Amino acid sequence: MRDWYNANFPSWKEDPETVIATDPSLIENSTEEETENDSDEEELITNPHAITLPEELSKRNIRPLVAYLRDPDNETGTRNCDRLRYPGPNDDDFPLVPGILHGSDPTANILSIDPSSKVLVKTPWFEIQRELDRYASGRNGSFENRVYALTIFPSEDAYVGYHKSVRQLNKDDTTYHLDEETMTVTEIPGAPPEVLPDRTPIVENVLVIPADLQLHPVAHAALCVNFIRYHAMKPIKIPIRTINEEESPAMKKGGFIAFVNTFVECLVEEGGVIPERIELECTGLRQKDVVRRERLIIPEGVTVHPRVKSDFLVGTVFGAKGVGADDEEEEGEEAKK
């Protein structure tokens, strides 16, 4: 690079003959204009149709979900459900995941034996995927062990414009056109924000637990998800998560817990906070120790279901090769002292 500059710009190391000095007043004016522009910045556009939960539900660690009614005549069966999941390129619809809302709720006088308690629903795919990305599913996930506030709208109100995020609404759609003859650039402003009519929900903030989640075997996209009604003191399985692993002689040297049960069935009182997890205290755990229920830290307002036995087995501590031998040597040295 140095040789290239020496060949093309021999005087690149010399000082310039004229120095363009900047007027200090111009700098002051520019800073003032920048501050004025910063103060005059427009506020972010928010989606007026976004679902906002009441404060009493948000405090209980409940998140919102949106679904739509499913037409029993034209949106049931394998082929019709496939059209919901994979709409054509010329369709106005967006991907929807079919499912059923069912289960009993004594607080609302709904019995599961009543056929009218089963409601056909379809949930936007991105609503489900957003929660799967956050909480995952399966043995180590908690999506199917959380409580959501489900709001159901009529089938004809299913439109993707109601689900736009703040980032999409504030995206600058301005384009620029260059005239090659005159070399002028023309600014073409983007389309104005779409004004959508207000919609009225059929059912609002029904507490549910996702169930029977089916995923695509390769793409891992949701194919079907049902919802079971939830009410206070209804059994719910809460995942178990370990804490204080560094205080365990076995786990801090590479040991681990081979879980037999990764969830524990609990009851949550009326108005109580539904915990994300039940913490497992790992302090003092050694290799081959059996971890049982007494090491679980149950938060306030939550009780373990009576059918969970007092000797409920969580798992067993195992370690890398040599961990147990090191512990035995340390114990032997302490005994000699």
Image (tube, rainbow, N blue to C red):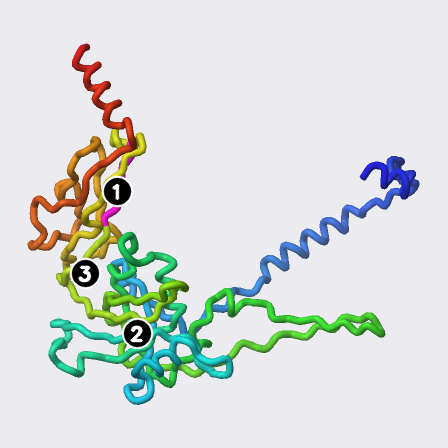
Looking at marks 1 and 3 on the same chain, the residue that comes earlier in the sequence is marked by 1
Q: Which residue is mark 1?
A: 242
Dot 3 alpha-carbon crowd within 10 angstroms: few under 14, some 14 to 19, many 20 or more? few
Q: Amino acid at mark 2?
A: Thr
**Image quadrant of residue 52?**
bottom left
Q: Viewed as shown, does residue 178 lie left or right of 230?
A: right
Label of residue 151 in the image: 2
- Front-most of 53 and 129? 129
**Residue 26: percent from the left, percent from the top?**
76, 51
Q: Which residue is mark 3?
A: 271
**Residue 309: percent from the left, percent from the top?**
7, 49
**Image quadrant of residue 273?**
bottom left
Task: Kindly state the secondary structure of the residue where label 1 is placed.
Answer: strand
Of tags 1 and 3, the one toward the viewer is 1
Residue under the point 14% across and 42% down:
292
Residue 241 lies in the magenta-colored region: yes
Q: How far apart are the alpha carbons under marks 2 and 3?
A: 20 Å
